[in-house]
Image: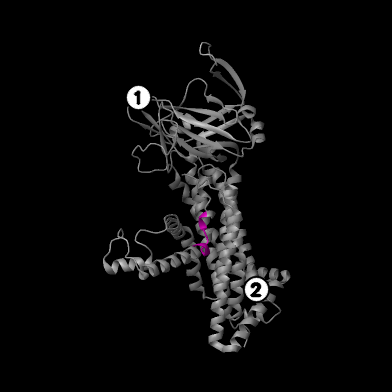
Amino acid sequence: MSFDVNSFELGPALLQWLAVVAVCAVVATIVGFGIALLGGGTRGAAYFADALRRGVVDLTRLSWQRIVALATLTVREAFRKKTLYIFAVFILLFMFAGWFLQGQDLDKPAKPYVSFVLTSVRWILIPVAILLACWGLPADIKDRSLHTVVTKPVRRSEIVIGRILGYSVVTTLVLAIMSVVGYVWIQRAVPPRAQDQLISRVPVYGEMTILDRNGEPGGGVNVGDIWEFRGYIEGNTRARGVYRFDNLDVDELKDNDQLKLEYKFEAFRTHKGEIGEGIHFRLTLVNEETGLRVPYPARGDLEIQEFAGETVERDAKPVVEIPRQLTYLKAPDDEASRPQETTVDLFEDLISDETLVVEVSCEDSGQYLGMAQPDLFVRMPDNSFATGYFKSMAGIWLMLVLVIMLGTTASTFLKGPVATLLTFGLVVMGQGLRVFMGTLLEQYQEEGQVTGGGALESAYRLATQMNVQSPLPEGPATTLIKWIDTRVFDGLTLLQNVIPDFNYFNMTPYVANGFDVPWNAALLPSIATVLAYVIPCIVIGYFSLQLRELEAK
């Protein structure tokens, strides 16, 4: 598992949200105004303007007393529908899960148990949230029980908000109970030998560059590995992997009086070497301002085995604990003199402006060391397993709230089955299809085109039996085709941003692999994603209910 170390940037995301909302609002206004003109002429235009005016008034004069009352009724209705029966399925899974999880991951015995609990909670509660949100309003409209509500002094926007809050309260209660049960089960079910894996490591990743055998920036040596995730440096040369760690919390490190570096490099041999020995490498701590370079360890090298799995790495302890006081042999200024032992302070002499540079070198001739950006990180003091576990549950809760908002909004203009299909489709697209769309659009934006062109260009090539490498003939028709395809890709970009990204909410890989859930890469984008859909869902839900005749006849 390799983690995305890129932090979520709230400022650009907010600007993008404003742009998408503005475009969607303009398109909806134009379409609505056109339909009103076609349906009623000048009277239709007046009705459209009156609807907008009433919408602004309705959405800005909310009564939280009425919203809470509607939410309370929604909660009671959900319990009358036996929502808590879902616990029977959850408990049934836990009764027999231990039979199938034992021995599933010999390298990380605790990982299957953690993954099972988080995945089970996630996929048990998603259908519950969808069914509650998508079938509530359509059932009330069908039974005409909602007709008596709208005749009271209750605004349609308050109905939408009350429904969302009510269903959110129900799923929150269910999730809270399941979270506690799951946590206790993990603590009891994980074998004693794997209890030390129930931790939440706090990594600080750095920026990595690779220097070739001449000490010049490069991309690493290609050793024939199909997966190009790691670059390889040649042993006993000037090749280096340079990691730069910025914004280190030096005060927290000083409290522990040491610096922990955790690594997960890969070894590649060109010859057998010493039997029973791994490939040796060394770390060099560098202060770029003063030019101070301190190798660690001062005597001897670190070792990594080829094809080493998690068991070998755990036995080899791939964590380097660097003490505050470092002693090394300093090269003399005079060649006739001997090297002298020198002691430096890690935090005062090597870390400058909260920045530390670490160089990694392979010490064996003819051997190679593979590394990627997440393969070396500063390990801050560990948090408890409960911290990461309940953060992951918070991510599931945020996802359920978003599903409820989407389902409730869909139920304001669709019947229950269709609203369920739409909401579930958005969940599926938000987890799988959105990644594909992002890759396609990124390729188009970086290269200016996709192989074979867009939809119209591809259709032209099929009709004329032209291969994808041949350029289109010059002329107005080609210009028009490319212009239309560009607009289509712009529309896909807008559509991609409309579909919620559900990948942020899946924090299981962090906790299952013993990492804490990061704020910038997981929690912050999850919260921002939910907040981004609050206003659009309420507005769409209000106008959808406004177009429906709900008053009792």
What amino acid is found at the position of numbered circle 1 in the picture?
A: Gly
The residue singled out by tag 2 in the image is 157
Query: Residue 40: in sight, yes or no?
Result: yes
Q: Secondary structure at mark 2?
A: helix
| Vertical arrangement, residue 232 with respect to residue 185, above or below | above
Q: Residues within 10 Å of mark 1 (few under 14, many from 20)?
A: some
| Vertical arrangement, residue 549 with respect to residue 334, above or below | below
Q: Which mark is residue 273?
A: 1
2 vs 1, front mark? 1
Tell me, yes or no, whether the highlighted magenta stretch contains residue 371.
no
Region in magenta: 496-503
Tell me, yes or no, whether the highlighted magenta stretch contains residue 498.
yes
Residue at left offset 44%, top offset 67%: 488
Residue 361 location, x and y as percent? 46, 29
Colour convention of the picture: one colour
Between 413 and 38, the residue placed more toward the observer is 38
Residue 413 location, x and y as percent? 54, 76
| Vertical arrangement, residue 347 with respect to residue 385, above or below | above
Residue 59 location, x and y as percent? 67, 73
What amino acid is found at the position of numbered circle 2 in the picture?
A: Ser
C-alpha separation, residue under disc 2 versus residue under disc 1: 73 Å
Res. 31 image quadrant: bottom right
